[in-house]
Image (cartoon, rainbow, N blue to C red):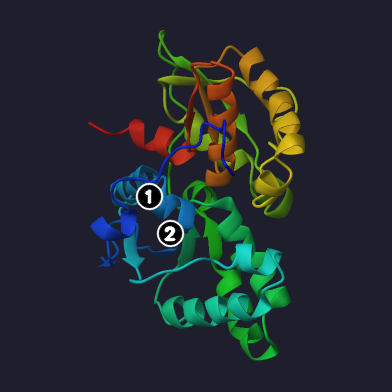
Amino acid sequence: PLLAGRHFRTLAPVPFHRDHPAMNTAAGPSGLRVAFFVGCLIDKIFPHVAAAALRVLGHHGVGVVIPGNQGCCGIPAVSAGDTRTFNDLVRYHLELFGAARVDAVVTCCATCTSTIKKIWPSLCDDDLAARAKALAARTMDLTEFLAKRVEIGVPQATSTDARIVTFHDSCHLKKSLGVFTEPRALIRANPNYTLKEMTAADDCCGMGGSFNLEHYGLSARIERLKRNHIAATGCAVVATGCPACMLQIADMLSQAGDRIAVKHPIEIYAESFSA
């Protein structure tokens, strides 16, 4: 079997789009509005991360537009050489998001962000290029948007019983987008956590999309190195801004018997002001 022996998180009982088919709220005190590109893994496996994103944006008075009937960003299709499906998805989402009157398009998925910003403009059909570049220019990872566009506050004094958290820099978030200080700033804003850096935090976890399925032996060897670096910190939680990395890391930690939770930095930040 394709996933035999793996400890993958199952599909969520209710995907995010079922509870939030569409949304269009006005800007609050921040004066800002964003369009939220959900992404497949966040929608279907980690809807609680999207829910945390809405809590965070609401807390900061940011209006949210969620266009209905969103689909995939297209990275699986283009990675497999299916340029027709890729361009169909780009065209569809340019229509869906292109006219939105917002200050930014944000996602909680490093891969989706990287695809929209880097892959859409460079690989789409010529007739889509101008619109793809325009949308790419205002697309940001949500952690970057929060760190740069709203006031997240200075790090608070760490509580005496703070949990140790370490952070894994996903390839798409750090190497493609150059975003790595911003998610750490959100983590440090929660006094119930203390951030402890792991060795080689930006080494690949071994996921690589379909690479994990086609070359699982090598993928697992890469991930075991990452697992060892995570465990060496003594952390209770490992955070990362990529849902694919969340799947891969959780799989290997579970196989190793580690009791280490895997969270998105948005979840940790949301906890800092949740009741």
Q: Quadrant of the C terminus?
A: top left
Residue 173, given in percent of the width and then of the height, sits at 64, 48
Type of the residue with mark 2:
Val
Residue at 62 percent across and 86 percent down: it is: 128
Name the one closer to the observer, 271 or 238. Answer: 238
Q: Disc 2 vs disc 1: Cβ atoms closer than 8 Å?
A: yes
Would you name the residue on which mark 2 appears? 38
Residue 70, given in percent of the width and then of the height, sits at 41, 69
Q: Quadrant of residue 36?
A: bottom left
Residue at 32 percent across and 47 percent down: it is: 51
Would you name the residue on which mark 1 appears? 50
The relative height of residue 203 versus residue 229 in the rendered view (above or below) is below
Q: Which mark is residue 63?
A: none
Residue at 44 percent across and 76 percent down: it is: 97
Q: Secondary structure at mark 1?
A: helix
Q: Residue lying furthest front in this view? A: 1
Residue 29, given in percent of the width and then of the height, sits at 29, 56
